[in-house]
Image: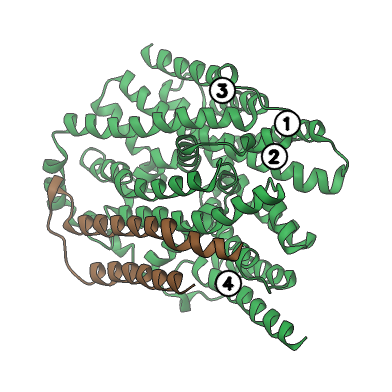
Chain colours: A green, B brown
């Protein structure tokens, strides 16, 4: 009974917070999509953290550590910290351009700065296409968490539908203001609960040190720097470093955050704070995942993603287990609402306003955005309900696809001589190369242990640089 | 621009140092909390990394960008 009370209390407080304690957005796109660009450091920081750390932080992260060992920590922490530098390089410029030219979406910025509609359309298609599987995976996570907390009383499908509609209500009513208010609350909840989980598990499992000592004797491969089964080679490690740092700023929900700070000082402080979080925080789910071997040896594949709930179930009372899992729910909610809003802003400003109703007024745009939010949420829900077996591997590939947008943005922001046709070709050919390498349509032996994203990223960047060199030469010739 | 290039070289050196040193040395002995010793080296590298980002954001890039705009 207590787990239900915790769950219902969390949901009630959350949605009351999002609906009733937040100032309503004004009826214009800047307010609805960007919360009037007036976030201060704490709000922007927690919004960035909560949006970025998805349900994967709670469930998948420990699962990966279970499979790979402690080697998973440096790979994830370095990559995520490294993203901060790209947040600043891109976000700094994006914030200035957004303020000067009133850009609201990344696609709008690409169109405005490159002067090309075709490039912006391809950019938009890839940006949105790659986000849909990620959105669906979040809903899959929510369905599983609710099923777990309620002990099966709420089925997976019921959980997915319930969470989708609850989120829809406050996103549609509260706009970005409601989302930021929820992000702050959820960010604090998820960080606190993750730290609480490790402290309580440490106590009930008999101490992290003692468990690590005995585990190292039994399974020394979990403690080596290359990971279990030589999982990480330097090349693979560098691939992951590149993947995380380039794809994170290209997620539309993260890019949108670059435009929401009140001034550049606030954005700078947020970026610096962000860089310090992963080294301290990411060790927690990794320890939980590795120590999972003590009580639950031999889990295969995705079964290990449930290692945190399994440990909590064994060592802590039901109410505590439910409490920690609401943290996972908080992580899920704060990622999904931001994805919905980011896709809706692109759908409204870069599709509806460009190709459907060019003369739509501010109120009309907000109305269209609400319908798009509904539509996208339904698509995510249907994919989650169908739950194709390959969804997780598709998500991994879409992250790589998002990373290829990074060289295009750098080219447009900082290399002033690249004609849009070069960027267009670079992106399209890069994505085709990525698909060819990922699905092994071509030989991949020459890559060694590198991930497909590494050659595809270099290919895309080289074409952008070639465009810059050609553009400069052409300008000199004139 | 010179500052940014110098910073980039410093940054790449940290990453390469982390990769080369840690992948070529055996640090399998356990340290505080029973965590592997190499994990603490990585932690230190990451702090250095984060401080470098701080320096970059606070001094180099901002000036550079202001010049461009």
User: Alpha carbon of mark 4 to alpha carbon of mark 1: how far?
Assistant: 36 Å
Residue picked out by circle 1: A370
The secondary structure type at the circle numbered 1 is helix
Q: Sequence order check: which comes first, mark 3 or mark 2?
A: 3
Does label 2 lie on the same chain as label 4? yes
Q: Sequence order check: which comes first, mark 4 or mark 1?
A: 1
The secondary structure type at the circle numbered 4 is helix
Residue picked out by circle 2: A344
User: Alpha carbon of mark 1 to alpha carbon of mark 3: how far?
Assistant: 16 Å
Q: Where is residue A74 shown, x and y percent of the image?
A: 31, 56
Residue picked out by circle 4: A461
Q: Is residue A380 visible?
A: no
Label 2: how many residues lie within 10 Å, few (<14), some (14-19) or many (20+)? Answer: many
Task: Name the chain under label 1.
Answer: A
Q: In the rendered view, would you say A254 is above or below A232?
A: above
Residue at the image position 26 percent from the left and 24 percent from the top: A316
Label 4: how many residues lie within 10 Å, few (<14), some (14-19) or many (20+)? Answer: many
Q: Where is residue A323 shown, x and y percent of the image?
A: 36, 23
């Amino acid at each position: 009974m207590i787990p239900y009370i915790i769950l219902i209390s969390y949901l009630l407080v959350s949605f009351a917070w999002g609906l009733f304690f937040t100032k309503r957005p004004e009826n214009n796109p800047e307010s609805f999509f960007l919360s009037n660009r007036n976030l201060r450091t704490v709000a922007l920081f927690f919004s960035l953290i909560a949006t970025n750390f998805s349900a994967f932080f709670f469930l998948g992260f420990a699962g990966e550590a279970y499979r790979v060992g402690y080697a998973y920590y440096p790979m994830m922490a370095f990559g995520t910290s490294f993203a901060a530098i790209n947040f600043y390089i891109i976000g700094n410029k994006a914030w200035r351009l957004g303020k000067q030219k009133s850009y609201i979406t990344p696609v709008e910025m690409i169109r405005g700065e490159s002067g090309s509609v075709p490039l912006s359309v391809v950019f938009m298609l890839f940006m949105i296409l790659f986000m849909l599987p990620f959105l669906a995976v979040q809903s899959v996570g929510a369905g599983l968490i609710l099923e777990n907390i309620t002990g099966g009383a709420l089925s997976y499908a019921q959980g997915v539908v319930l969470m989708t509609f609850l989120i829809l209500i406050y996103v549609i009513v509260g706009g970005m203001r409601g989302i930021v208010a929820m992000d702050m609350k959820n960010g604090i909840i998820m960080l606190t609960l993750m730290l609480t989980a490790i402290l309580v598990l440490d106590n009930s499992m008999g101490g992290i040190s003692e468990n690590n000592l005995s585990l190292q004797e039994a399974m020394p491969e979990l403690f080596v720097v290359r990971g279990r089964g030589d999982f990480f080679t330097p090349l693979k490690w560098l691939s992951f470093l590149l993947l995380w740092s380039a794809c994170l700023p290209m997620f539309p929900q993260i890019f949108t955050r670059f435009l929401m700070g009140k001034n550049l000082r606030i954005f700078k402080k947020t970026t610096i704070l962000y860089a310090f979080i992963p080294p301290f925080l990411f060790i927690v789910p990794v320890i939980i995942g590795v120590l999972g071997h003590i009580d639950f040896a031999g889990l295969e594949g995705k079964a290990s993603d449930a290692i945190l709930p399994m440990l909590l179930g064994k060592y802590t009372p039901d109410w505590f287990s439910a409490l920690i899992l609401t943290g996972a729910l908080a992580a899920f909610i704060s990622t999904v609402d931001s994805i919905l809003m980011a896709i809706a802003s692109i759908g409204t400003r870069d599709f509806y306003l460009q190709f459907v109703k060019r003369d739509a007024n501010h109120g009309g745009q907000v109305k269209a955005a609400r319908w798009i939010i509904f539509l996208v949420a339904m698509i995510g829900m249907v994919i989650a309900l169908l739950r194709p077996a390959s969804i997780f591997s598709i998500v991994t590939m879409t992250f790589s696809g998002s990373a290829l947008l990074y060289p295009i943005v750098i080219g447009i922001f900082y290399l002033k001589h690249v004609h849009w046709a070069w960027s267009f070709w670079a992106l399209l050919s890069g994505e085709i190369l990525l698909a060819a390498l990922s699905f092994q349509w071509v030989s991949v032996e020459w890559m060694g242990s590198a991930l497909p994203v590494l050659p595809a990223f270099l290919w895309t960047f080289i074409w952008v640089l070639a465009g810059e060199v050609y553009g400069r030469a052409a300008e000199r010739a004139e | 621009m010179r500052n940014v290039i110098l910073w980039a070289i410093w940054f790449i050196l940290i990453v390469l140092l982390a990769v080369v040193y840690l992948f070529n040395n055996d640090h399998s002995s356990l340290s505080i909390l029973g965590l592997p010793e190499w994990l603490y080296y990585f932690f230190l590298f990451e702090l250095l990394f984060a401080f470098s980002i701080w320096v970059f954001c606070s001094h180099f890039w901002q000036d550079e960008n202001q010049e461009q705009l």
